[in-house]
Amino acid sequence: MSNFTNWGDEVDDLKQAYERLGLPELAPREDVEKRYTTLMRRERSRAQQQQDSGKESSGNDEFALITGAYRFILEYEDRKTTEAFNEQEYGKYKGMADKAQKMDHFWRYYKFHTLGAVVAVALIIYGIISFVNYREEQAYLASLPPVDLEVSFMGNYYLNESAEKEEPLEKALLAAFPEWKRFKTMMTPVPEDEANQYAYMQKAVLMLATENPDIYVMDKNIFQWVGVQGVLKPLDDAAEGELKPLLKDGLALKLKTEEDTTERIYGIDLSESALVTDLPLYKQDMVVGIRANAKNPDKALQFIKKYLETVK
């Protein structure tokens, strides 16, 4: 019998392979697997018995032929499955089937390489565009005049319908301070509703830690929260100096910080000043405090003084 290393007459070889395994021709693959497993266990048992009896283990030529038959059947079935798949996939191409198959195999093998190359090119293009945009932004910022005052709005504030589309707060403040060239503003809305405050407060904490404005414009609730954290500058000296003639009762707001148990002035209530009407905001009240490490503390104080002069 053939040792199943050469195909020879395939039909005869296949028939002999099934006979070698003791199976009917074209038995299901599951039966082939089970039969070979059974024969393999018998061979292992026979070899173990020889070893236990002290006999010299000898190779089993019959089992080698069984293994050859088993592999022949599996190779035949795999090849037939592949041929059937190729016929289904590429048979419609007829004379071009071979080329279509090769192209498909090429794509399946190299698709991840190709996609990787596309992604790499996209990242390079994105990097170039980002760099160009960054350079343009830096050039634009360099062309602007220096910031006179940086203002952070934090609290239950929202732009109203009258707000312009571009830089509404900056333009409103410049209109009130025509002698200055530039304001920079940022706004962190924090609603009064405690059920909706958590996410907004997280952003507010981040802004306090990373941003460094000159002044904060806050509602009274946020003033109490910001003030105790020690980020505001005490205004007691200013209240006794240049601001004293303008400070009506109740406008100077005091509190204690976490590190200083002495009650000091940290905010000025400008809720009744022109600041409220100048800005296109929905608001309830406005308390202004100066950041402890403000870059422009003199102009921050000038800002407070000017709006104090408009308090009703």
Image: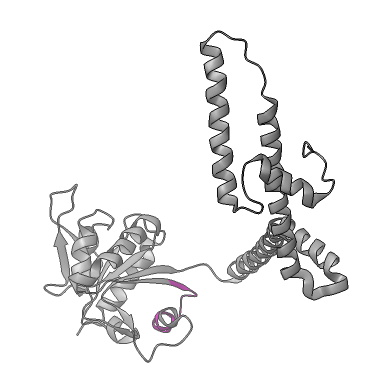
Type of colouring: one colour
Residue 172 in magenta stretch: yes
Q: Which residues are magenta?
A: 171-184
Q: Is residue 240 visible?
A: no
- Residue 116 or residue 76, whichever sits in front: 76
Please report the residue visible at 40 percent of the width from the left and 83 percent of the height from the top: 172
Quarter of the image where the C terminus is located: bottom left
Quarter of the image where the N terminus is located: top right
Residue 139 in magenta stretch: no
- Residue 20 or residue 115, whichever sits in front: 20
- Residue 73 or residue 91, whichever sits in front: 73
Find the residue positioned furthest to the bottom: 162
Please report the residue visible at 68 percent of the width from the left and 29 percent of the height from the top: 62
Q: Position of residue 168 (x, y in %)?
A: 43, 83
Q: With 250 as the anchor, is 57 left or right in this view? A: right
Q: Position of residue 159 (x, y in %)?
A: 35, 83
- 273 above or below 47? below
- Residue 65 or residue 276, whichever sits in front: 65
Q: Position of residue 254 (x, y in %)?
A: 15, 62
